[in-house]
Image: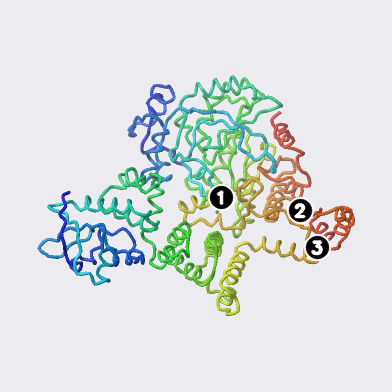
Amino acid sequence: MKKFYPEKIFVEEDILDLPLTRQVLDRCPGIAVEVVGRAKELIASFRQRRFSLSDGKKQLLLCRNRGRFLEPCPGTKKDYRCCCYSILNTGTGCPIDCAYCVLQAYLNNPFITLFMNRQDMMSELEASTALGRGGITRIGTGEYMDSLALEHLTGFVPFILPFFRKRPELILELKTKTVLIDSLENLDHGDAFVLSWSLNAKEIAEKEEKGAASIAERIAAAARMTELGYRVSFHFDPVIWYPGWEDGYRKTISLLAESIPPEKITWISVGSLRYMPKLKMVARKRFPETAIYSQEFIAGLDGKMRYLQDLRIEMYAKICAWLRSYSKDVLIYYCMESPCVWEKTRGFSPASNTGLKKLLDDRIL
Amino acid sequence: MDFTEKKISPALADLADRTFEIRSAQKAAELTASIRRTGIINAPYVMARKNSDRVRIVCGFKRIRTALDLGIKEITVRRIDGPAEEKDVFLLALHDDLAGVPLTPVETAGAVKGLLRYFSEETVIQEYLPLFGLAPLFDTLEELMLLAELDPEIKQGLTQGILAKKNAVHLADMGDSGVLLYRMFCAVNLSTSKQTEIIGNCEDIIRRDRTSIERLLGENEIRSVLSRDDLTRSQKGDRVRAVIRKKRFPRLTQLEEKFLKVRKALVLPKNIRFEPPPSFEGETFSLRIDLKNKKQLNGLPDVVKKFVDSAPVKALFETDGR
């Protein structure tokens, strides 16, 4: 898998001298750099030009995060079970181009953006009183970007490792569709991380996840990491219906079963494709060939589009059965599903979001 | 720019040269009546054509056409003297039009397309879109260009109010398929939101089933609705919409039909409403009972008991595993 290097880098003037900025620029020799005032103004000016999100994915913006670094996952707490995840914002956007990526409609910033004010991030983490309260805090960096796609530029993992090592009540989940694991190979990780790979049917990965590693490569990378003692987990998310989907997902699960002993897996999540209504138009324009938005979606109780409940139940029941034939014990949970769907496919539902959180926490302890 | 007032024959105006025409060419009865009564009050702007007696019209196409229609032999015009850059003349025409009644979306799109002949996209976005009251964004420009390039049939539909702007833009984006859908809309009566729904559903069906709008609209179920003389245009519209929705959402419509059968079998009084979960998401059915007086209130336990004991309700909840 090719490492990402931008065609051009924009740098906010006031972060030019920060150590991380210097490091990223040093690791991108020969790439044009333009110093700009505020990122906000740059983004606004590009909205006045013929400049697409696809163009933005070739360019890197280094700037200061003026908001919070740590935030609760924007899951829907009321009608669907949420695992009480926390998000650590290290940047936004991603060189991998998935047809279903919510960021296409969620962000108004077309650039791959990295936040350079790491010391502010550390201060916020150190000062947070919410971390570790009520058990384990699972924190992820893969919500607004791939956790490892830019690791060769940022060196984030070795940077953050000491903080997580000294806080055993915290666990950092690094979610990726890449196989960029070389920087993790020689780390004394101390079980501070869960390395997670997003998995899908091979057909979906090939058609709808442009620039991502193949499914076989992802599983092979995960297998390698288990050998190095890392915790690994997998996310079948989004599960996408297409003609022949059963065969596609079954094959991926078989490959997983052949490659990784189930006891090495911390958890597996399953979640069907869901999206904010606005995404369909944006994604269709960018991916004219995709048919993933043309299946039977309804507006869910949170306003997001989801497959009709009956269809979700059918898909989850089958996927869980295949996963169960692989392992009776591996923890399988649903991301953002209703108690009703849990009940009908698993015979139980976590009593609350805290109940679901506890299921996951118990895998860490 | 300098101008000279001149009297000329309207026949000397080159109506075929529409370089500076921004407003649509439709005649206005009020203008005809006004010119018949008082003549042309505001002199049209023209510019001389090289080595010719004829003049190019800058502003006042409608006034000059109307004068010709009324057989007026001579009109007063303001002629631009000396050399003038075409882009400055276009801006003159634009500002003249902006001073009048607001431009329609199609006229705005045409004007912006005209501006792009003389200025870069960035200049048009930043300097001129706000003149039309539009956001200075590339997306706005892109939408306007779709409108400017509309198929003439769809453009007419927009002008005549058969289509709303957002639907016209969407149809334009669909190419020939959009024109076919527009023709179907002309044969029925549908609100803007229903048209939007049909456009979206048709797009989804053709992607999902790898078919075409032509084949979809040519299917028997739709053709037979459209050819029925006993239905009003509104009835045809609603039925076509239902057929397309069923094709788009086969599982959902099956659930809806099943529930409707149950509800029909219940023969509920008018003050009771029984509804499934919205889009069958979740498992909460709702029973609403409207009460007007004490008598109805006292009868409530019986009403609820009858509902609970009814076979269709029992069957519904049993088959659903509740």
Image quadrant in which you'd find residue A81? top right
**Residue at 41 percent of width and 37 percent of height:** A43
Q: Position of residue A3 (x, y in %)?
A: 44, 38
Q: Locate residue B71, reporting x and y percent.
A: 24, 72
Kindly report the distance in space between the C-alpha atoms of the residues bearing marks 3 and 1: 36 Å
Q: Nearer the viewer, residue A116 or B250?
A: B250
Secondary structure type for disc 2: loop
Q: Chain of mark 2?
A: B
Check disc 3 and report its element: helix, strand or loop: loop
Q: Quick one: label 2, few (<14), some, or many (20+) residues within 10 Å?
A: few
Q: Are marks 1 and 2 in contact (CB under 8 Å)?
A: no
Q: Residue furthest front?
A: B37
Q: Earlier in the sequence, mark 2 or mark 3?
A: 3
Mark 2–mark 3 CB contact (< 8 Å): no
B35 vs B264, left or right, is: left
Q: Is residue A26 visible?
A: no
